[in-house]
Image (spheres, coloured by chain):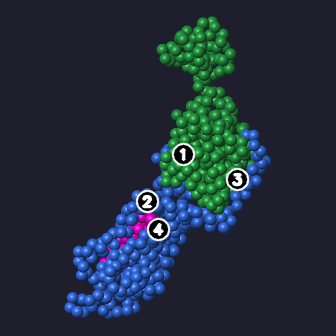
Chain colours: A blue, B green
Amino acid sequence: MTSSIPENPASAVAATPLPRCNVLQSAWALYTFTLRQHRHGKRWLIMAGLVLLPALLSILARATDPGVSGRVLEFDLAFMFIPQGLLPLLALVYASGILHDEQEQQTITYLLLRPVSRPLLYVVKLLAAMTAAVVLALVSTTLTYAAIYTGQIHLADAAMRCLQACLIDGLAVATYCCFFGLLGLLTRRVLVAGIIYIALVEGLLANLPFAIRLITVIYYTRLIAYRALPFVVPGAFGNTHNIAADAWHFHISGDPTLAHDPHTWMCVTVLLGGGALCTAAAALLCRNREFYVKTPDKA
Amino acid sequence: MCAQAVDSDVGPAEIKPIVAFHDVSKWYGNVIGLNKLSVRISPGITGLLGPNGAGKSTLLQLATGQLFPSKGTVEVLGQRTWNNPALNRSIGLCPEQDALYEWMTGADFLATCARLGGMGRTQARHAGERALETVGLTRQKDRIVAGYSKGMRQRTKLAQALVHDPQVLFLDEPMTGTDPVARHDLMDIIQRLAADGKTIIFSSHVLHEVEAITSNIILLNRGRLLAQGHIRQIRDLMDQHPHRIVLVCNNCRVLGAGLMQWPHVESIHLHDRDQSLVVETRQPDAFYAGLPQLALQTKQEITEMYSEDDNLEAVFRYLVPT
């Protein structure tokens, strides 16, 4: 060595934390970088296909049955298919591999070796994944409404309903992202576990008319949707009935205002709070977790 | 074999070490990665040597805060490494795995790494360009990483470790898979970085690579410190082992017959239809001194002679139990 070396090099350098503004710059760089990551790969194509599916189905339905009720179509696609099938899948695909994907691709080292704490790393990457999932959910919902109501009267009403549906879907997919993000840290087989969760919990339990459905995300989104949007359609004998109440097992005969179910603000609080709790737990897990990267040796 | 730390410039006690492991053990379930390792590394270049599975990568991952020690403490620049992101401003790691963000260009990757380190956009771009220039990738900086050769990928990984101008560099098998030209270039780069005042700890199991760059080495085997110090001093530890010397000549059988008379020659093995022989001796100096005379006496022309003990392979062979 020919260079000048301080007599006591260890004391010559003080590894001080990044200033707050630099932490924000790092976090923003990580956020935009993760969004760019989501734009690459085959996942994007598969997701695009899924996102277009409800709109294509509604076009198909209208083409094959011109007399189909827009409200029924809206309910079946925007409030059954999208929340129950598309939203959890979107969240599962984007949020389950927040750090797991980097670990599998062995690129996580480049992130861990930056002056960003692990909890912050997780939270920022979760936000980016959430952004991607929410944008896709909103695109899907908007296209579905456009496919259902284009050419029909009451477009302003349809636009308002679309906006409300978008807000509900955005909230739901954000909550799912937080949950699947945590699940991704708890199990290596997160896709299998996630699909089982979607099928059993959000699919089966949410549709049982018992208190067990209180643990599902979809129950709260349905309550919000039910209170925000009318789902009354004319019946076969000139009467009307609420298709949402029937399909979602809301006991409106004895409790027409659903006073015994959580209020809208409570539903929003539960979804946001649940998401925050999942995120906090996941960040805590990240703080103390070692992310093993397969070296050729270990492989 | 127990650890044989020799008096060396790798870890003199009077200088506070850059990297210090105090009685560190690391377990992966039931598998031990490092076993009660205590080592101090001072400024300069230090080679981390050991066969596959010796614990080199574990040591580097502990030193860079990717793993936490099951027991003991790890300090770099006087600070604990686990959960200490601030320390990452002063250290850089070139990882072993050949993984990069394939869809990015080299310049984009470097600028992103710099921005993740807290730099602004312009500053990050300049830092990335500087790092790419240091590793000689300026001309290829706008190409997609997926199209890079192995040597270029290694340089890119090295550049990301340098982009924030760290004081300490950890290089995990930086020459793996590279061709001789790229290998030579990387060695040059590492030596230049050391000359610029950076402390470099690099691992390898290709021993001549290490020997070409530094004489300060740490030998690991099965998670334990086998030896630490200057290569010459480590070779002194081998005195109890016979040295192997290879001779290439026209008729080595005749020469071998003469060598058999020497008391310090332990064994002779003929190879290649008597065209070469391998001598094992406990007194290499006496052997080299007497060989010209014997060659004259037996009228044998020795066309090539080399000692298999001149490189670190010999150190391994003697010190690493098989």
B17 inside magenta stretch: no
The question of residue A76 being in magenta is answered with yes
* Tag 1: amino acid: Arg
How many other residues sit within 10 Å of disc 4, few (<14), some (14-19) or many (≥20)? Answer: many
Q: Quadrant of residue A45?
A: bottom left
Q: Position of residue B117 (x, y in %)?
A: 63, 59
Secondary structure predominantly adopted by residues drawn in magenta:
helix
- Tell me where residue B178 appears, x and y as whole percent: 54, 39
To which residue does mark 4 refer?
A132
Residue drawn at x 63%, y 17% is: B264
Host chain of mark 4: A
Q: Position of residue A121 (x, y in %)?
A: 56, 63
Q: Looking at the image, is mark 2 or mark 1 nearer the viewer?
A: 1
User: Which of marks 1 and 3 precedes in the sequence?
Assistant: 3
Numbered label attached to residue B153: 1
Q: Nearer the viewer, residue A195 or A18?
A: A18
Q: CA distance from mark 2 to mark 3?
A: 35 Å
Does residue B27 appear to the left or right of A141 in the view shown?
A: right
Instruction: From the image, tell me which residue sits under label 3.
Output: B77
Numbered disc in front, either 4 or 2: 4
The answer for which chain carries disc 2 is: A
Extent of the magenta region: A74-96
